[in-house]
Structure formats: C-alpha cells, structure tokens
Amino acid sequence: MASINEVATQFFEACEAGKGWEACQAFCKPDATFSSQAEPLADLRTLQEYATWMKGLMGMMPDGRYDLKSFATDSKRNNVTAYAVFSGTHTGQGGPPPTGKKTSSDYVYSMDFDGDKIRHMTKIWNAGWAMKELGWA
C-alpha cells in the first residue's frame, strides 16, 4: 500500500496539470467529495467535478503552473495539505473571452484519506483576488 504522502503527491501533480478525472481517479475513492468556499467552486460537490473544472481552467490558461510552497502529512488525522501559488495568463478558449491578463493566486488543498485513497478534499482559495486580476470580476 502506498503512503498517503505519495498518493497525495501524485494526485496533486495530475490535478494541477489539468489532466482531469481520468488521471486523478486512481488516487481517490470513487465517491470522493469536494468542498470550497470559493465562489467559482461553491457548487462543486465531488472530486471528479473539481478535477474536470481544473482541466477546463488549464485550457483557458495554457501557461498555468504552480509553485509548491509546502506539503505536509498529518498521520494522526490521516490527511495531507499542500500550499501552492498558481500563476497563469488567460489566453485560451473555453470560458469568457481571453483577457490576456495574469494572476498569481495562493491556495491550499486539504486531502482527507480513507486508507490510501482520498475520500474528501477541501480547497481554500481567495477566488475574488484571482477573478479581479484576470478581469473576470
């Protein structure tokens, strides 16, 4: 059985690259849930929906990338947190017309595990900041 740190790392890398649920599902329970208080994500309830959303976002920002600042495993609570900064320019299609504007936005993933699979993930993100920088708000 892989460690939760290894699973979280593989999930994070696949999700942040915009590879979609096809690449992320191997690291998650089939019914893995998702939550976020960020406005663009507030209606998403499953990790599958979030991975699909990220795939779409990366289509709108083909230069999207992350700078991982911290990655921590809490064995007592069976979770892993990742803190990163996402940067990208809105030049691609798939959402509002491209603005050519850039964002650099902090966020945190908190991934809760059941065994060696993610059962729930919460994303903590100040979406309003990114939306303003991109010219979407």
Image (cartoon, helix red, strand yellow):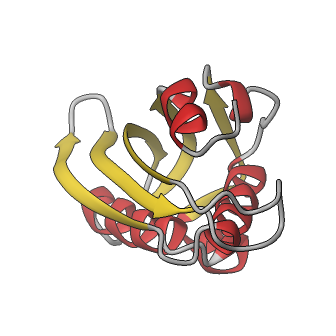
Using the rendered view, name the quadrant where residue 13 is placed.
bottom left
Tell me residue 84's x, y (percent). 29, 49
Tell me residue 51's x, y (percent). 67, 60
Along the line of sight, the residue nearer the viewer: 34 or 96: 96
Q: Residue at x 60, y 36 (%)?
A: 131
Using the rendered view, name the quadrant where residue 90 is placed.
bottom right
Along the line of sight, the residue nearer the viewer: 88 or 114: 88
Does residue 30 sit above or below 42 in this rendering? below
Name the residue at the front extreme: 100
Left or right: 54, with 106 as reference point: right
| Count of marks, rendered view | 0
Left or right: 85, with 39 as reference point: left
Along the line of sight, the residue nearer the viewer: 58 or 21: 58
Tell me residue 136's x, y (percent). 70, 39
Q: Residue at x 46, y 62 (%)?
A: 88
Does residue 134 sit above or below 54 in this rendering? above
Tell me residue 101's x, y (percent). 54, 55
Q: Residue at x 35, y 72 (%)?
A: 1
Using the rendered view, name the quadrant where residue 116 is placed.
bottom left
State the quadrant of the C terminus. Answer: top right
Q: Residue at x 61, y 78 (%)?
A: 19
Name the residue at the top extreme: 37
Along the line of sight, the residue nearer the viewer: 3 or 102: 102
